[in-house]
Image: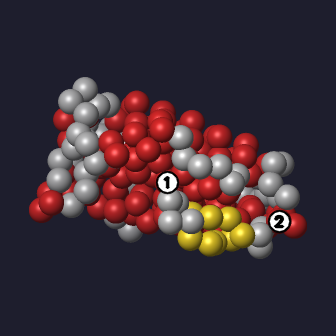
Amino acid sequence: MTDDLEFWMKGPVQGVPGLLQPVAHALLQLRREANGDLAAFRDADLWMRPNGVASVGFHLKHMAGVIDRMFTYAEEKPLSDEQFARLRSEAAEEEDGKVSVLLDALDKTVEEAISRLMGIDENRLTETRFLGRKKIPVTLAGLLFHSAEHGMRHLGQMKVTARIVSPGNFNTKIV
């Protein structure tokens, strides 16, 4: 029965500090839903943009990218040249793009994020961190929670786009 439950209902994620459990739960839920919903999604539909909305491919790339970037800022590090290149390429259609490759990248990013959460001291969550090139002051907790919240926002948008462009190849039932 626990396989049907959302992650927040399953109890603590081992090794993740208590105050960061909601971040871990949201990231794990994001990963599970993206993989489940797109299990039968066609590669040919990955870059379709009905009425100009963002493609499923963009959302998959952006979810992984934003999680990685927020965790980098949380660790008080600047983005690398590789991270900037990925950011610039998030909206770019990949001719040989495959759903499985983008889902694998998202899976890896979520696993890395969970691992990174395990090393965070809860006593530091209110410490200031700086976001982006403008060095906008935020908190460590804000960055971590935003990574999960922003990822879930794009998951919802991705689900709508996927249902529109490929209704027969999208796994989530309308409830």
Between 106 and 132, the one nearer to me in the picture: 132
Between 60 and 39, the one nearer to me in the picture: 60
Residue 19 placement: quadrant:
bottom right
**Contact between labelled residues 1 and 2, with CB atoms less than 8 Å apart:** no
Dot 2: within a 10 Å radius of its alpha carbon, few (fewer than 14), some, or many (20 or more) residues? few
Give the residue pinned by disc 1. Answer: 66
Q: Tell whether 29 sits left or right of 15.
A: left
Label 1's element? helix
- Residue 41 is labelled as none
Residue at 23% across / 40% down in the picture? 93
Residue at 65% across / 49% down in the picture? 77
Residue 31 lies, in percent from the top left, at: 53, 48
From where the camera sits, is residue 1 visible?
A: no
- Residue 124 is labelled as 2
Q: Amino acid at mark 1?
A: Val
Q: Tell whether 142 sits left or right of 41.
A: right
- Against 103, residue 158 (above or below) is below
- Against 127, residue 3 (above or below) is above
Residue 138 placement: quadrant:
bottom right
Residue 141 lies, in percent from the top left, at: 70, 68
- Against 30, residue 100 (above or below) is above
